[in-house]
Amino acid sequence: MEQEVKLEYSISIKDDQIHSQDLPAGVKIDQTTIIFESSEPISMNLNIEIEKQDVEVRYILNPGVSVELIETRSGGHGHHLKRQIQVKENAHLAMLTLDESDSSIKVSDEVEIDRFANVESAYAELSLSDVTGKYAYHLIGEEASAKIKMAALSSGQYKKSYEVSLLHSAKVTYGEMNNYGVVKDQGHLFFDGIGHIEKGYSQSATHQTSRIMVFDKECVAKANPYLFIDEYDVKASHAAGVGRMDEEHLFYLQSRGMTKNDAMRLITYGYLIPVVDVIDNETVKQAFNETLEKRMGD
């Protein structure tokens, strides 16, 4: 039976290098690159502290590697974090990114997925800040797959904008994204979902869903789906919607003794919580719930 490597540690990024106290077997750092090369499954909790204006981090999963990664970040007000993730042949990555900070930031992910590799990625975006996110997934090898989940909450007067894209550049690839958001107060939230199957890459499939629930009249929300299909023998679909909270659900919960705020929290939790199911970790789910309660306010 394979032995799982358990890991929880913090790193800081400054002077164009990653700084950390120690590393487990099967994981090493080369300047701003984290390389996973263990033959055993790796479970890793990574806390990133950003200490410079523009930060670039690279993750490399060598062939056959299996990684379960929970990443949280702090610092970096007004900064730009770029992550390049290379998932090589037959590798597997399950990744949950938690942004619970109060710092405005721009984030870019470029994820490259090779033959028979698969990625399950989730973004839990509960920060009290302006955020611009651009998450690009490139399926470059046959039978590569990517499943992406996004859960975002925008409140106060914060503006949040996300672009999630799936580019299919090989045959028999599969891409799926599910973006869910909640907006309250005078918050702004925008989702752009992009699926593109290039010519010649038949038997591929790209699917996307984007939905935003709006609490207040002064919220601004928009969900934009885009499909670019250059091949015939493929499957593609999209769904997008923006709407108010179901008043009947709210009334029902209040009739059972809940306050309006508690009922709104419960509905929001049910709407956003599937994002953390990418990784089976009860501690993470509890932390997500506690943060969500704080963000929803009293």
Image (cartoon, rainbow, N blue to C red):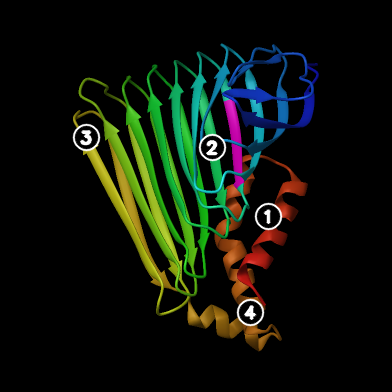
Residue 135 x %, y %: 43, 38
Q: What is the distance, in whole Å, between disc 1 and disc 2 at their CAs? A: 16 Å
**Label 3 vs 1, first from the N-terminus:** 3
Q: Which residue is mark 3?
A: 229
Q: What is the distance, in whole Å, between disc 3 and disc 1 at their CAs? A: 37 Å
Callout 2 touching callout 4 (CB < 8 Å): no
Question: Could you classify mark 2 by the number of other residues whose Cα lies within 10 Å: few (under 14), some (14-19), or many (20 or more)?
Answer: many
Residue 45 x %, y %: 72, 34
Q: Which residue is mark 1?
A: 288
Callout 2 touching callout 3 (CB < 8 Å): no
**Where the C terminus falls, by quadrant?**
bottom right
Q: Residue at x 41, y 72 (%)?
A: 219
Helix, strand or loop status at disc 4: helix
Q: Label 2 amino acid?
A: Ser
Q: Label 1 amino acid?
A: Phe
**Could you tell whether 286 is left or right of 183 in the image?**
right
Closer to the camera, 43 or 3? Answer: 43
**Label 1 vs 2, first from the N-terminus:** 2
Callout 1 touching callout 2 (CB < 8 Å): no
Mark number for residue 261?
Answer: 4
Q: What is the distance, in whole Å, between disc 1 and disc 4 at their CAs? A: 18 Å
Q: What is the distance, in whole Å, between disc 2 and disc 4 at their CAs? A: 30 Å
Residue stretch in magenta: 93-98
Nearest-to-viewer mark from 2 and 3: 2
Residue 235 x %, y %: 29, 36
Callout 3 touching callout 4 (CB < 8 Å): no
Q: Residue at x 36, y 23 (%)?
A: 172
Q: Residue at x 33, y 30 (%)?
A: 167
**Could you tell whether 68 is left or right of 192 in the image?**
right
Q: Which residue is mark 2?
A: 121
Q: Label 3 amino acid?
A: Ile
